[in-house]
Image (cartoon, rainbow, N blue to C red):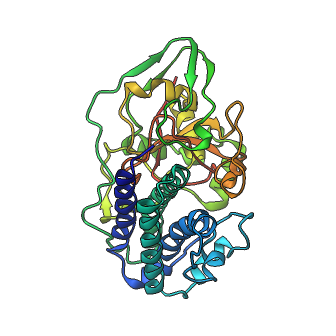
Amino acid sequence: MSTPDSLLHFFLDTRKHTEAICQPLEIEDYVVQPVADVSPPKWHLGHSTWFFEEFILKPHITGYKVFDNDFSFVFNSYYESVGEHVMRSDRGNLSRPSVEKVYDYRAYVTKAINDVIEEKKDNHLYDLIEMGIHHEKQHQELLLTDIKYILGNNPLLPLYSKNFKEHQEETHDQEWIPIAEGIYGIGHDSKNFSYDNELGRHKVYLNACEISNKLVTNQEFIEFIQDKGYQNFELWHAEGWDWVNKNNIKAPLYWHEIKGEWFHYTLNGLQKISTNTPITHISYFEAFAFAQWKGYRLPTEFEWETAQHGFSWGQRWEWTESAYLPYPNYKKAAGALGEYNGKFMVNQKVLRGGSVATPIKHTRPTYRNFFPTHTRWQYNGIRLAR
């Protein structure tokens, strides 16, 4: 359990960082929604504020007055037990409330939570606030990747910031980290914060295998493209092959072939691809097909967790071969917070590690991210196993 002072510092730093992410935006950028999966920045600012108001202030603070009665409908994401909400695909239609009013909302709720931390001295409320902080950190990552999608689909391919570093070369030599056949412990086992989907420490049996200490690079993926990997149906799942053909997929998201050379859109603008940096913005379908082409496979999430101490991770969310399923004895929390993870445990793949967009103090070896198999707008990459 955090002390009140450390929790308050953590809370205020998190709130400031969310707004700092939006600082480079023009006012017109705040409401754009190119596709249903991408939420406008204004909505993220409001939703991460609504979470504190809905789950902490409204039920636990006597006499609390909500900022605006319509905001629960506008900024609820998917919590059916809380009430009705705007359809996800309609978030870009919310020209009102204004950006200014949403920032006023943030200031109003931030002050109220500040007062709760300083005055209540309630461990249960502190736990809920810590959950809200990590929920906002998740949205900080989503903010960055959604901003990139918004700007990356603008025909002018505008610059977001000169300071955000997306691509860093791994300079060490490739080695294969062995995992001996045996039984291993999996899952979160400390008193530090974790999500419920990490709980249920249990044992798994693993066959002997090896995992690469390096991520797959852009150069390796270019070789896959040049060898007509996107045209070879034998490398793909049937659903993946349908996805490639239906969507005319020929390269990772944000890649542009210009006069025979590969460029990609980055938050620093359009740049020539650095061949030795890790590939990113690829789907599970592409990760699987590449592994097939290379003669290897993707690791399971249990292999990844067992071997992760032997390699550096955190540049890319790494696709695994594991379906997103509950651990043994998993139990959803009562009420609305039980909707946080459990109801998504179907038709998703687990990703491990973290990315260049993941905020500090928000990842750990047991963190289980999850996305549908076609997802590409996150900083997803590939680590091979054999």
**Residue 87 left/right relative to 223:** right
In this rendering, the count of numbered labels is 0
**Residue 102 left/right relative to 156:** right
**Residue 56 left/right relative to 261:** right
Q: Where residue 290 sits in the image (x, y, percent)?
A: 53, 39
Residue drawn at (67%, 33%) of the image:
327
Q: Can you see residue 266?
A: no
In which image quadrant can residue 15 be found?
bottom left
Between residue 267 and residue 9, name the one nearer to us: 9
Q: Can you see residue 60?
A: yes
In which image quadrant can residue 208 be found?
top right
Q: Where residue 230 sits in the image (x, y, percent)?
A: 56, 48
Q: Where residue 361 sits in the image (x, y, percent)?
A: 39, 47
Is 357 situated above or below 205?
below
Between residue 193 and residue 26, name the one nearer to us: 193
Residue drawn at (65%, 56%) of the image:
245
Is 155 situated above or below 356?
below
Residue drawn at (53%, 74%) of the image:
43
Between residue 104 and residue 47, name the one nearer to us: 104
Name the image quarter holding the N terminus: top left
Q: Where residue 343 sits in the image (x, y, percent)?
A: 72, 51
Is 235 situated above or below 371?
above
